[in-house]
Amino acid sequence: MTYAELYELVKEYTHRNDLTEPLLDQMLNLTSVRLGRDLKSVTNEFKSTLTFTDNIAPLPDDCREVRYLKDGDKYPDYVTATQNIYGDCYSIVDGNINYKATVADLIYWGVPPVADTTCLDRHPSLYLYAMISEVARFLNDADMIDGAEFQYTTELKLTNKSESQARTGNNPVMR
């Protein structure tokens, strides 16, 4: 699906042909940020190599949740900022990772750029309902908001569940 096709679907679902492309572009940006926040999919998973100075490295700007840190063959544990860092543990303080290393790989959930259509290609209905919800807010249409939010949250739960199962199978995930 292309963004042009998504725009046409949004116009059809909302019964509004007066929605302009600049307005829909703004709604698309809001939708992308929301999906970046809510969706836990491989389309939102990123890798960054961190370089530590005095055991500190800044998190990437688009990082919304750290999945794990990898230091060679080691996967250090996360500890809270108030705990001391011993051995293979790291903490996050003020947008920085504290870890005793010089270089490590960070795997994190982030917000994909709008130009990247991978998320739209993999989850078109989720994108559609999220965008209709944003348009409904703009139009201040309470009934449309309720309907779109119901569809969005239902689709999001199913999508996150299937994405989790794709990563872990039906095995329980320990947290």
Image: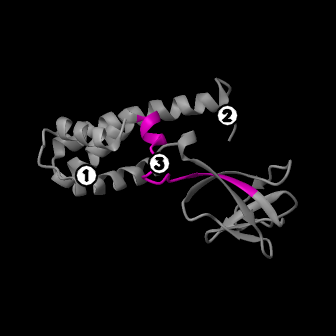
| Residue placed under numbered mark 3 in the picture | 116
In the image, is residue 18 above or below residue 64? above
Q: SS for tag 3?
A: loop
Q: Residue at x 24, y 57 (%)?
A: 22
* Mark 3 or 1, nearer chain start: 1
| Residue placed under numbered mark 1 in the picture | 24
* Mark 2 or 1, nearer chain start: 1
Q: SS for tag 1?
A: helix
Q: What is the quadrant of the C terminus in the image?
A: top right
The residue lying toward the viewer, choosing from 77 and 116, is 116
The residue lying toward the viewer, choosing from 85 and 60, is 60
Q: Residue at x 67, y 64 (%)?
A: 92
In the image, is residue 4 above or below residue 47? above
Look at the numbered discs 3 and 2 and tell me whether their residues touch, using CB distance below 8 Å. Answer: no
Q: Which mark is residue 173?
A: 2
Q: Amino acid at mark 1?
A: Leu
> Magenta residues?
105-123
The residue lying toward the viewer, choosing from 21 and 171, is 21
Q: SS for tag 2?
A: loop
Classify mark 3: residues with Cα within 10 Å, few (<14), some (14-19) or many (20+): few
Q: Which mark is residue 62?
A: none
Question: Can you tell which of label 2 and label 1 is closer to the viewer?
Answer: 1
Q: Is residue 78 magenta?
A: no
* Mark 3 or 2, nearer chain start: 3
Q: Is residue 118 magenta?
A: yes
Instruction: Identify the image quadrant of residue 101.
Output: bottom right
Q: Residue furthest bottom?
A: 54
- Position of 12 compared to 105: left or right? left
Q: Amino acid at mark 2?
A: Val
Disc 3 versus disc 1: distance between alpha carbons? Answer: 17 Å
Q: Amino acid at mark 3?
A: Asp
Disc 3 versus disc 2: distance between alpha carbons? Answer: 29 Å
